[in-house]
Amino acid sequence: MQYSVKLDGFEGPLDLLLHLIQTYEVDIYDIPVAIITEQYLQYIHTMKELKLDVASEYLVMAATLLAIKSKMLLPKHEDDFLDQQMELDVEEDPRDELVRRLIEYRKYKFAADELKEREAARSLVYTREPLDLSQFEKDETAQQVTNVTLYDMLQAMQKVFQEKVTRSPRQTTIERQEIPIETRMDQIKQSLLSVGGKRRFTDLFDKSSKEFVVVTFLAILELMKVKSINCEQQDHFSEIYITMIEE
């Protein structure tokens, strides 16, 4: 019976060659064939000494390395005619084909390692069947709204100021009455609660004094900051609505 044995986790001759290249810290594009071949043959010899079944692909690679080594050791002729021929026909480095195979194999090896890491990470994630969330859906069909930006609110404030200027009569006597922002915040919340938690933005400015309008606007911004209210707008330039956020 034959057994498939992996020596030190090597998947094949290319894997063993990559291990030798990394061990001796040599450039994969400039492999010292003599050293690598000697170490590779020592691994093959060790496998035979241990009476392990050496796969034919290891022997084929050993023959390839010996062939490359032989070509590298061939003496170079100094004949002028041959030199001219070599200048015309530049010989390919005998190691080039092996280097290409090693680089291609290394790409797949790195990709396989990355896929194994992703598989290990994914194995830690547990999923379950989707739940029925229909009971949490609201009965009333609410209109889709977009988030209101500060620029939208400033544009709405411009309309408020314009309406207050045109509607409010001119007064000869100015009464100054300071309103704390905290007080106005409480008034806005009470006003929203009295109508079911939702009012138009412009309805909160029921007084024409400039101070009241400014304090109301700042109070709305502060309520949004503390997440007590939310501003909704169906379309751009449409009416803005203020809604209470349930605590």
Image: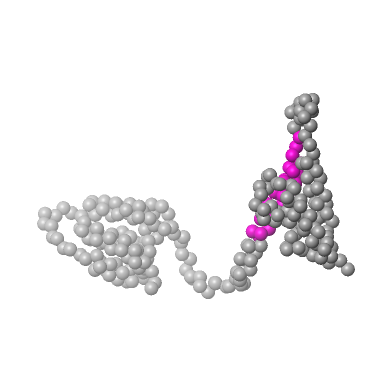
Name which quarter of the figure residue 150 lies in.
bottom left
Please give left or right for residue 158 compared with residue 111 in the image. Answer: left
Q: From this view, report whether residue 191 is shown above or below residue 13.
A: below
Report the predominant secondary structure element of the magenta stretch.
helix
Q: How is the image coloured?
A: one colour
Q: Nearer the viewer, residue 78 or 203?
A: 78
Q: Indicate whether residue 230 is drawn in magenta.
A: no
In the image, the segment drawn in magenta is 91-115
Please give left or right for residue 133 compared with residue 85 in the image. Answer: left
Question: Taking the image as drawn, is residue 14 in sight?
Answer: no
Residue 33, percent across and down? 74, 47
Q: Indicate whether residue 105 is drawn in magenta.
A: yes
Name which quarter of the figure residue 212 lies in.
bottom left
User: Where does the C terminus fall, quadrant-wise?
Assistant: bottom left
Q: Residue at x 51, y 72 (%)?
A: 136
Name which quarter of the figure residue 40 lies in.
bottom right
Q: Nearer the viewer, residue 124 or 77?
A: 77
Residue 52, percent across and down? 83, 64
Q: Residue at x 31, y 59 (%)?
A: 202
Residue lying farthest to the right in this orientation: 1
Q: Residue at x 73, y 63 (%)?
A: 8
Residue 166, percent across and down? 23, 51
Q: Nearer the viewer, residue 88 or 162?
A: 88
Q: Nearer the viewer, residue 242 or 81?
A: 81
